[in-house]
Image: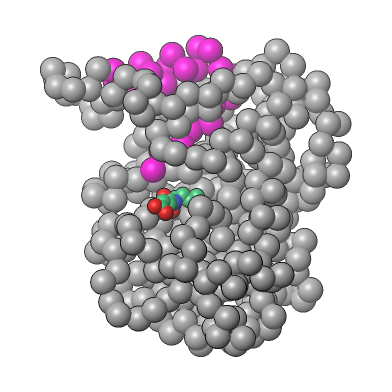
Amino acid sequence: MMKHFLSVKDAGDVISLVNEARECKADPYVNSELGKNKTMGLIFMNPSLRTRLSTQKAAINLGMDVMVMNFTGEGWALETNEGVVMNGDKAEHIKEAAAVVGEYCDVIGLRSFPSLVDRERDYSENILNAFVRYSDKPVVNMESATRHPLQSLADILTIEEFKTAKRPKVVLTWANHPRALPQSVPNSFAEWINQTDYDFVIANPEGFDLAPEFAGKAKITHRQEEAFEGADFIYAKNWSSYHHYGERYYGKENWMVDQEKMKLTNNARFMHCLPVRRNVIVSDDVIDSEHSIIIQEAGNRLWAAQAVIKEILVSK
Ligand code: SN0
């Protein structure tokens, strides 16, 4: 039973859902009648490449019709606060907007990044939860303020495909970036990997530890090279600070993943959710090497989305 797909809590057993994604990959059109006369609505408050195309294609493979709308610039500016006098620049309240989308769609995908200004508000997931509450339809999280579960499902599928040890050492490493980015991808990655039996290490600068409820039982180190020793997978990602909320890094250490650091690993595979800043997050020679599996990882986004939408359709 899957009502919504908001976090790992909706996934049931993680490895079973990974196996469902594998089945979709092996036989993509076996359920092409399941979504007949059903409409998937994809709502974007932020840019997207992989999420938009993979989720759209997944719904098409299941026989659904798909409508995509960018709210930024194309929809009315949304008010998300309760009880405000709407005499400013916000033309429509999220209550009506979500309810109206629910009138037209059977399943709704939503992308809405954090403000990175107000931690309490971001971590309350007020926008995602408003769509859940007011649309009255199943909602798929296509990256919210605190999570990106479709990415994490694809990541575990990819690790399962490429792992050579039964219990691989998986390292999530923070890396440099010129902008302040959400914690959504690393939060979800940690939340999902904590549901597996992998050896899991997170490396990040001091002040950049993830929220404890996401880091969970992971080993945390502030020394990147120590984490890389014997790693089977290096998963790079930048995130802004949770503790000094939304701040970016002004320290001097270079956290870019390069060949020197990769030499410390057990011939590790390199992963990143994309989009990636070359020669900031990762050097050209690592991302272009045969150890890089970023394209296969992105390809697996389709099968992750298809498994999730299928589960929602069969649960309705
Ligand atoms: C988003 C993030 O959450 O980090 C989406 C990742 C799937 N990434 C960015 O916003 C990158 C923007 C940039 O300027 O590189």
User: Which quarter of the figure has residue 198?
Assistant: bottom right
Residue 60: horizontal and vertical position, in percent? Answer: 71, 26
Residue 299: horizontal and vertical position, in percent? Answer: 69, 48
Within the magenta stretch, is there residue 95?
Answer: yes
At x 51% / y 87%, what residue is drawn? 226
Residue sitting nearer the eye, 65 or 257: 257
At x 42% / y 17%, what residue is drawn? 99
User: Which quarter of the figure has residue 291?
Assistant: bottom right
Residue 17 visible in the picture: no
At x 56% / y 20%, what residue is drawn? 67
Asked whether, in this view, residue 49 is left or right of residue 97, the answer is right
Residue sitting nearer the eye, 122 or 235: 235
Residue 239: horizontal and vertical position, in percent? Answer: 39, 61
At x 63% / y 80%, what residue is drawn? 231
Colouring mode (rainbow / by chain / secondary structure / one colour): one colour
Residue 147 visible in the picture: yes
Name above or below for residue 194 compared with residue 101: below
Within the magenta stretch, is there residue 40?
Answer: no
Region rendered in magenta:
92-113
Name above or below for residue 70 compared with residue 273: above
Quadrant containing the C terminus in the rendered view: top right
